[in-house]
Amino acid sequence: MEAKNNDIVPSFAISLEEVESRIHLLEEFIKKYMIKGEDYGEIPGVSKPTLLKPGAEKLCDVYGFAKMVEVKNRVEDWEKGFFHYEVEVTLINKRNNLLEAQGVGSCNSKERKYRYQDPYTIVNTILKMAKKRALIDAVLSATRSSGIFTQDVEDMELQEEAAKPSSEKQRKFIYNLSKEKHFDEEQLRTFCSSVIGEDKPSKDWTSEEASKIISALQNIPNASMIINTH
């Protein structure tokens, strides 16, 4: 018995009119109910806005998705202070219990955002970030909204990090590290100024500048090496 063409040739499951209607409804929902800076963010130079966690959760609610979260892989090295999590989020349609999409996200303590923080105090933060990335990945797939949003979360965070002020943890880390390497106050001020190209109080450092100082401090044995080279 020969197979009919309809059985072997892919065809649309819904009409073009239905496709247009769904896209229009999604665009209208985004326009009316999603808030810029809270549900999605914009990155200069990137054509599409970035979907953020609150926006992803709103889309789950309006589409009627239930979330199932599973940690697929974890590395917890308490001796070396390295932590890595890979998470899978599954979205289930509440109306028919069918699987709509799955998303994967990972995060680790060596990423730029977490590299200079105490890894033992941010374990839960790292796990939450992996979950968030997996959720956004799943929502973009389930809602077919990757044409509207992007998931360049890391790019957005790095840009925000460059502009935001340094944290107390960063400044304290720099101070403690400088003491370990035998810097006095004047030596540290001169060293930091040479690294960031500007002499200013530590409270005025940006997060990116503080990261540069930390990296530079970690790459020298002690203060005497700096003094001897000037």
Image (cartoon, helix red, strand yellow):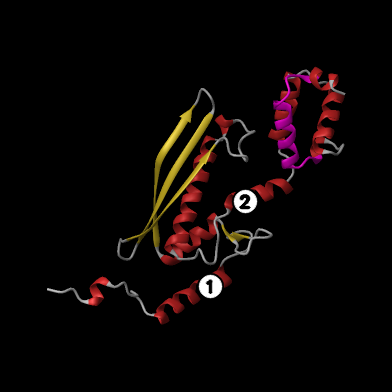
Disc 2 designates what residue? Answer: 155
Position of 11 with respect to 17 (left or right) is left
Percent coordinates x, y for residue 103 in the rendering: 43, 53
Percent coordinates x, y for residue 45 in the rendering: 68, 60
Residue drawn at (86%, 29%) of the image: 190
Q: Based on the displayed image, in which of its 4 quarters is residue 226 positioned?
A: top right
Residue 62, placed above or below residue 75: below
Residue 169, placed above or below residue 64: above
Q: Which residues are magenta?
A: 204-223
What mark, if any, has residue 141 been given in the picture?
none
Residue drawn at (12%, 73%) of the image: 1
Residue 107, placed above or below residue 134: above
Q: CA distance from mark 2 to mark 1?
A: 24 Å
Q: Based on the displayed image, in which of its 4 quarters is residue 199 positioned?
A: top right
Q: Amino acid at mark 2?
A: Asp
Q: Are marks 2 and 1 in contact (CB under 8 Å)?
A: no
Residue 198, placed above or below residue 66: above
Category of crowding for the residue at label 2, using alpha-carbon neighbours closer than 10 angstroms: few (below 14), some (14–19), many (at least 20)? few
Position of 213 with respect to 2 (left or right) is right
Position of 111 with respect to 144 (left or right) is right
Q: Is residue 214 magenta?
A: yes
What mark, if any, has residue 27 been given in the picture?
1
Q: Nearer the viewer, mark 2 or mark 1?
A: 2
